[in-house]
Image (spheres, rainbow, N blue to C red):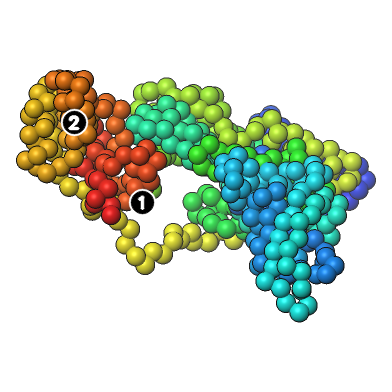
Amino acid sequence: MAKTYKEINDKIKNGNAVVITAEEMVKYVEENGPKVAAKEIDVVTTGTFGPMCSSGAFLNFGHSDPPIKFEHLWLNDVHAYHGNAAVDCYIGVTRMVDIRPFEYGGGHVIEDLVARKKIRLKGNSYTTDCYPLAEIDTEFTIDDLNQAILCNPRNAYQRYVCAVNSSDRTLYTYMGKLLPNFGNAHFAGAGALSPLSNDPNYETIGIGTRIFLGGGIGYVLGEGTQHNPKGRFGTLFLKGDLKQMTSEYLRGATYPEYGTSMFVGVGVPIPILNEDLALKTAVSNSEILTDIIDYGIPRRNRPNIRQISYEELFSGEIDINGKKVKCSSLSSQYHARKIANELKEWIEKGDFLLNPPAETLPTDSIYKPMRQSLELKFVKDLKRKAVTCYEDCEIKIVAERIINKNTNHIIITTHENKLRGIVTSFDITKAVAQDKHEIKEIITKKVITTTDNEPIDVAARKMKQHEISALPVIDEQNHVVGIITSEELM
């Protein structure tokens, strides 16, 4: 039995619509079957609340007197993009303050804005005859603005990967802090509550679809950037009125040593137009699969360890090659459920009608990586043969090798060529001055390393961050396969 949007909206207006959440739909279809569900259920509500870095807002301040045409402007010291009309700007959630990086960014500005807090606006101009004001420094709240439009180019991924780290150092990523040697695992997304998991072919989601966004009403503008339906990584381009939204569902976020973002609350109603949609909205966490990806290996060689279900992810512990690894979500399942239930209440009260999309999302888009005209260099392109000594060598032998090989770095290995540490010419100088004779007295055992397939700029950043001048190059078994120094990088 097929239904129409008009029939469902009429039931919503009359207060007769049957609305349940996506989690409730799983149990309902299991007990009653998709045919009965298609007949009895009118709308299934979804929800997700997690970090969505491709988000931001257009703001219009109105004209000052005398007027100004912004060349640069800052909101609470966060640099915003001015390249629109004179007093419009776009602030992105990942833009950080210059004076306190990693502490505050565009996402926090938007959170403060919807919380009705005062925002400091500083701006300057190159001045023109019609815009003679050169500088401005003032405060405003969201109610002083003409428009405050949340405009998010890429939100609500259909699924997210599970990120792990096999390397021997901690990684700070957009998937959070990944501990070395598979010390933890992070994932995101709401599983069975996730909007695009409940309409994987985008039959009801497209341009003009009315949604829950940030605590207010928003709309789908179309497919999000990097929309990749063939890889089950569909995305949404969303917009809504910030003045309707709340700071509960728009939260600024800080990722240590990575940057800032914003948690965004999104809920999409799925009209049950037919039996097929009833079945699709009953998808369970055990049926939604994603991949465990090793972030400890450079992107082009990054392995897919295995597929995993959201049911296993939500269990809090996953299996990686026989090792039990603690697993946690970057998204809030509590808020995802709350969004789905709030949207359900709006519809039941008749405050929210469904919009048939003017055009559904494409299902045949091809996702392409960046075209790179210059060849990217990797460590293997610049490394040289390492000068090594065994851990039981005398300091005199190490000193002689530094002189004979004209090097400042000696890699200390086992007899099986496994890395044990590093000694520099400065270490030898100190040893002589302090009358030390054994390698174990001067060796640096906590060594920052690199691999053949690490990009050169990453290796350079490691040296700068740790104030060192060389990195041993190791393979997956911790065997020394070379060395790269600041000389090669220069």
Total labels: the figure holds 2
Image side of residue 159 versus residue 424, left or right: right
Report helix, strand or loop for mark 2. helix
User: Which quadrant of the view contains residue 197?
Assistant: top right
Residue drawn at (28%, 42%), measured in percent from left and top?
Answer: 469
Closer to the camera, 298 or 132? 132
Report helix, strand or loop for mark 1. helix
Mark 2 vs mark 1, foreground winner is 2
The amino acid pointed to by label 1 is: Asp
Q: Which residue is mark 2?
A: 429
Image side of residue 393 versus residue 303, left or right: left
The amino acid pointed to by label 2 is: Thr
Closer to the camera, 457 or 154? 457
Residue drawn at (58%, 35%), measured in percent from left and top?
Answer: 330
Residue 312: % across, % down: 51, 28
User: Which quadrant of the view contains residue 223?
Assistant: bottom right
Closer to the camera, 354 or 275? 354
- Residue 364 in sight from this viewpoint: yes
Q: Which residue is mark 1?
A: 457
Residue drawn at (50%, 39%), measured in percent from left and top?
Answer: 257
Q: CA distance from mark 2 to mark 1?
A: 31 Å
Q: Which mark, by number, is residue 266?
A: none
The mark that comes first in sequence, 2 or 1, is 2
Residue 482: % across, % down: 19, 42
Image side of residue 280 versus residue 45, left or right: left
Q: Residues within 10 Å of mark 2 (few under 14, many from 20)?
A: few
Residue drawn at (17%, 30%), measured in percent from left and top?
Answer: 428
Residue 85: % across, % down: 73, 70
